[in-house]
Amino acid sequence: MPKYGMDSRLMGLLISSDYSTLPSNEFAVTQTSMGKRAAEIIYKALSEESFKVNFNATVYEITNELIRIAAHLMFGSELQFLHVKYAVEGDLCSLDIGIKKCPLCEYVKSDYSVCNLLLGFFGRLVELFLSRFAEIKIDSKEESCIASGSDQCNFVVKWRTPIGLPPPRQHEIEIRIDDEALEKKLREIENLDIYKKAVAYARQRRSSGGP
Amino acid sequence: MGAIISIHSFRGGTGKSNITANLAYCCASTGLRVGVVDTDIQSPGVHVIFGLKESSMKYCLNDYLEGKCSINDAVYDVSEKHRLSLGSLNLIPSRLRAEEIVKMLKEGFDVPRLSRGVSELLEKFLLDILFIDTHPGIEDETLLSIAISDTLIVILRPDEQDYLGTAITLEIAKRMEVPQIYLIANRVPVEFDAEQLKKNLEETYRLPVIGAVPFSYGCMLAQSREVYCLASPEDPFSKALKTIAEKIVESNKQKHDT
């Protein structure tokens, strides 16, 4: 049994039973709705009890932490994350969540993705958290599922930065080196006795092939 | 003969010692015999990460360099403490003593003695890899560590302050004909495109980047009190370090095979 959360294997068996008895669209709606409700209960508990927001952290860091903590509380340690990645393209933000060992679809073989419970859970969690700052519309999708032969269950949660708020900053990575300063510094080092000794020693060592 | 890998950064605070300790642990956990020498005599710290108290260190690298003991006397086996069942992990720590630092800075490192000590360690402990945690900047111990290295790994943060110094270190390593030189970008904010950063660094320095390690709050919160890859293997920091260690092990294996 996991230390926290429901026995996710039992949950997996219940999902399997629902899958075999309900029509596919009804199964998806019911499961998504259950996932959303679960997210609301966990989020409420976390926000009232212990989930403190560090406003120095980025949205990604907070949502990443929130997703991992909430999922652990709800589903126990058997649900293992492969990754939670954040991406920004213009005003479109997305979280890509990978699960490597999904106990929820363990007992199901299907032609389509069946982890609607997790889909609802992750989407609603992100929605609840971001709604603290602005009204956000979430679009979430299970892109691959172990039940349908994939090696991981993969969820993508997307939202757009609301009008009125600046889009998340694209962080440019520019590496500049001052060639003049580099040459100057190298000339200084070349004049050090220890540098001359070290270079001579290194060359001798390399030619002799040992330390 | 095992490989000597120096881990260096031009500036302090890049997470060099933390990366050294975690890489050493990750390599040892694959079954290799690994050693770590802390040549950062001015600000030693690797022993803290490995949970070795100064009071339990009878001898350390300082004593060996001063001729007060053999190198074997300064070796501490931390394998069991880190639950290594296959490989081994031996640490040769340094100690922070003001008078020793002043003396060392005044008289300089004994080059042949450090080199002999490293050879002895590789032979006596049949080490596959010996990591050297160096002092930041370009000082005596840095130059000597680079001189005796088979591989140099330079750590930098994606920070304007790090770029020039890294270029200096790499240029010196090239002149010393270090056979393998790699870069690791550490504390990379999650908002950065890690692949783009690696590409930019490789284009700038014309050397391979073997990893971009994400900034980790968990690792910061651990306060260097433990080997984080052992304590939190699922953290993105730990996963990145494990991938880098696999590359090092593979590269070392290829070198050994040839």
Image (spheres, coloured by chain):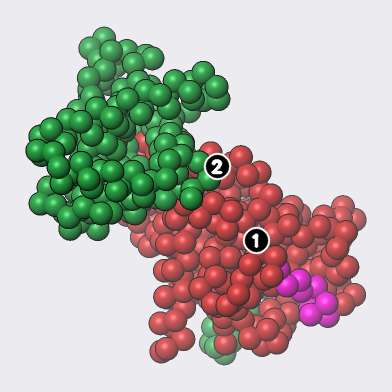
Q: Residue at x 83, y 77 (%)?
A: B73
Residue at the top extreme, as displayed: A164
Residue B236 in picture, x, y percent from top left? 44, 49
Q: Nearer the viewer, residue B8 or A131?
A: A131
- Which chain is assigned red? B
Q: Mark 1 packing: few (<14 Cα in 10 Å), some, or many (20+)? A: many
Q: Is residue A56 above or below residue A74?
A: above
Name above or below for residue B109 compared with residue A182. below
Q: Are marks 1 and 2 in contact (CB under 8 Å)?
A: no
Chain letter corresponding to the colour green: A
Residue B251 location, x and y as percent? 42, 75
Q: Which residue is mark 2?
A: B218
Say whether disc 1 or disc 2 marks the residue closer to the N-terminus.
1
For residue A28, what is the image quadrant? top left
On whether residue A13 falls in the magenta region, the answer is no
- In the rendered structure, which amino acid carries the disc numbered 1? Thr
Q: Secondary structure at mark 2?
A: helix
Label count reads 2
- Magenta stretch, residue numbers: B70-78
In this orientation, which residue lies closer to the viewer: A82 or A206?
A82
Name the image quarter holding residue A76: top left
Horizontally, residue A184 falls left or right of residue A14, namely: right
Task: Report the mark closest to the observer, 1 or 2.
Answer: 2
Q: Nearer the viewer, residue B67 or B249?
A: B249
- Mark 2: few/some/many CA within 10 Å (<14, 14-19, 20+): few
Residue B50 visible (yes or no): yes
Q: Quadrant of the C terminus of chain A?
A: bottom right
The disc at residue B134 is 1
